[in-house]
Amino acid sequence: MIVTPVKTDIVTPESTSIPALLDRHLSGFPDRSILAISSKIISLCEGRTAALTEDREELITREANYYLPIEHRHARFSGAITHHAFIGAAGIDESNAAGHYVLLPKDSWVTAVSIHRYLIERFGVRDAGVIVTDSHSTPLRRGASGISIAYHGFDALRDYRGTPDLFDRPLRMEQANIADALAAAAVLVMGEGSECTPIAVITDLPTINFNKNAPTDEDRAKFLVDPENDIFSPLFDFSRLRKGGSLEKKP
């Protein structure tokens, strides 16, 4: 696997569109490759920002699926679950944001589909993948790592269940999370500071199962787990969590 960062110009809110950004900076895209793109650069292109004068707590409440009220938080972490992941402050960020709060994209899944279509049409490739990345903190670990908040064009899970291990014992539980593993590698190369490389092209991926229709609704249902049904749910204190605005909007 080879992960190549793509340097771009500085993007400010609504200064460009995603296709125009890719037109300027993506000179090639090999068949059977995956494009990783940061959620922040998508949000800036979409104008998904808020003024710094807005109340940050109200933004967190509005943007989160679930959030931890301020009285229950650790001093350094604005706890929230959004996009089915633990993402601090519901993804609201003011770094590299030209004096704004940057929110997460309006619908990262829809954006991933549109970027996938762009890659197929512009470069004439048969197989392509897209990952929308963000950073999050992992419980019991210090520091941030990359995570996929949406993907398109490949199977995100590799299912080992029923296959034999080295000693011919059938595996019962094992599934590999391909999307998050690739996102973590991409974000590591893309950087978290002033690198100005919000895009990465991941090549040399012989074991990835490309699928132009993935994810289907069934795929997403398998990939995303509701907090109540998660294997870590016994560690959650649901009495302290509150439903956020983005969850309330869902039918």
Image (cartoon, helix red, strand yellow):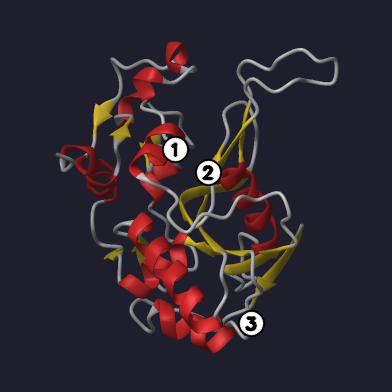
Q: Sequence-wise, which precedes: disc 1 or disc 2? A: 1
Q: Sequence-wise, which precedes: disc 1 or disc 3? A: 3
* Residue closest to the far right: 167
Q: Residue 161, percent across and down?
A: 62, 22
Which residue is disc 2 drawn over? 136
> Nearer the viewer's eye, disc 1 or disc 3?
3
**Amino acid, disc 1:** Ala
Q: Residue 78, percent across and down?
A: 40, 38
Which residue is disc 1 drawn over? 85
Kind of element beneath mark 3: loop
Tell me the quadrant of the picture where the C terminus can be found.
top left
**Amino acid, disc 2:** His
Quadrant of the rendered image containing residue 3: bottom right
Q: Residue 215, percent across and down?
A: 42, 48
Of residues 24 and 194, the one drawn nearer to the viewer in this rendering:
24
Quadrant of the rendered image containing residue 249: top left
Examine the rendered structure and indicate whether residue 34 appears above or below residue 197: above
Which residue is disc 3 drawn over? 28
Contact, CB < 8 Å: mark 1 with mark 2? Answer: yes
